[in-house]
Image (cartoon, coloured by chain):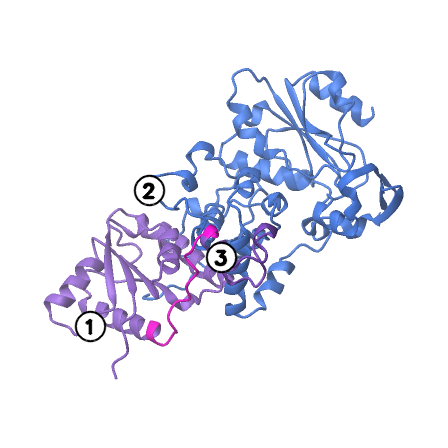
Chain colours: A purple, B blue
Amino acid sequence: MPILERRIIGFLCNWCSYGGADAAGVSRFTQPTDLRVVRLPCTGRMNPIFVVKALLAGADGVLVSGCHPKDCHYSEGNYYARRRLEVIKRFLPVLGIEPLRFEYTWVSAAEAKRWQEVVTAFTEQIHALPPVPRLPDDTGIERLLRELENSPLPICGCHAGHE
Amino acid sequence: MNNTEIMKNVLERASVLLAWGPGHDALHASPLFARKAHDVDKVVMDVRAVQSLAAYLPPLFQSEKEGRIAVLARPCHVRSITALLQEELIPVERLILVVLPCQGKLDMAKVMAACPAAESLDAAFVDGDNLVINADGRQWLLRLETMLSPACVRCPMPELPDAMIPEGCECVRLDGQARRPGEGGYAALDAFMEKTPQERWEFWKQEMSRCIRCYACRNACPMCVCRDHCVASARDPHWLSELDSVTDKLLFQVIHATHLAGRCTGCGECTRACPMGIPVGLLKMQMNKIVEELFGYKAGMDSKATPPLLTFEAIEKNIREKGK
């Protein structure tokens, strides 16, 4: 039985990895299909909150890929990104989120083969993990109403004894 | 000169002295904006003065009416002020630091747990090593050491080293005896990280379901300087909904922690301010630990240092990224 697809969000730099992924497709390299791509102008655009927001919203994994250090289209965007992404990767464990759910890496526009390897390896990594834990998305009032419904006690004195 | 005279003397050169004064009862102190010499007589600066006054500085300095601003600060508060100076959020030439040797700050939750009658007390004062509370016709003697905030117990720096006075800043020291230094470190965080990931996830799920979204943690934070432009209340981009869902509340805490990466001085104001007693400071502590491991950096130690996330190195010593 085939394993169900997982939701993986990929944030790719327009100038390199996005082209690399495109080239991999054009070259008809076989790739897993779990990844959904968001195109960024540069990995320097990457707000670390994107990662946490995606994971809390139900993504099983997040992959960021940009230009190799020294090759940034804007000279230094990926250097800033490297610091921020490394920080957020090390931050995830305190929330109880498996840090393997998030990776960042560098793939140039010419590295279609490497893109295929990266996306395959990352997808396997995510499939080896259970689905991402979800928080209850009900609000306080819904929670309160549910608790009251399940409560064996009468809600208040005035309704005691009435069915 | 005694401390009151020193402060009165400072006030002659400043339009306001930010200090602590009497609060709603004898156990609590409130911020006091002393403008006249007789205001200084009301200043409270023992263990009851728990709040950091650093958060008042950035908006106060924007006021055209203020001349120089003097602020009473414990060494941990000086770190917050140094961090504000690092980011040029307050002008060093208009600032006068009045530093007190720190004897620690009370953890009001601990006091209330040890003495529930303190809700309506008749008197509270410090006597030697004890906090004395008179309430309900009885007297409680609480050992000060056990009533201090956890940040104070581990504080390695109750006396401000000269090297940490921000460059170009006028600094006046008050007389007094500081408590003995603690060992520093991240003991509370390390204990938390011994839980399994599932336990940690469940912990935040439980704690965040108690959060009432009052944003006291943000408002108390000296480094939260966006004020009316906070991402938490922005509609565009709409990062957080107006719902009271656990996801939104946890995401806000993560946003707060990431915005403090490389900026948080670990003053503990967020945890102290939380009316629900949620230990939100753990997230910032994790951030501080990461920044220290990766970049060997602690915020608020050097007013000339650049925070590590505002800069980079072509070859990072401690980052081993994939694909190299």
Magenta segment: does it hold A137?
yes
Write the start and end of the magenta stretch as one range.
Answer: A126-141
* Type of the residue with mark 1: Gln
Spatial separation of the CA atoms under disc 1 and disc 2? 33 Å
Secondary structure under the numbered disc 1 in the rendered image: loop
Residue B15, visible in the rendered structure = yes
Magenta segment: does it hold A71?
no
Where residue B222 appears, as percent x and y from the top left, is 56, 38
Q: Quadrant of residue B217?
A: top right
Direction front: furthest residue: A162
Q: Residues within 10 Å of mark 3 (few under 14, many from 20)?
A: some
Q: Earlier in the sequence, mark 3 or mark 2?
A: 2
Residue that label 2 marks? B237
Secondary structure under the numbered disc 3 in the rendered image: helix
* Type of the residue with mark 2: Pro
Q: Which mark is residue B294?
A: 3
Residue that label 1 marks? A31
Q: Which chain carries label 3?
A: B
Spatial separation of the CA atoms under disc 3 and disc 2? 30 Å
Labels 1 and 2 positioned on one and the same chain: no
In the image, is residue A75 above or below residue A92? above
Q: Which chain carries label 1?
A: A
Where residue A153 appears, as percent x and y from the top left, is 59, 60
Where residue B129 appears, as percent x and y from the top left, is 86, 46
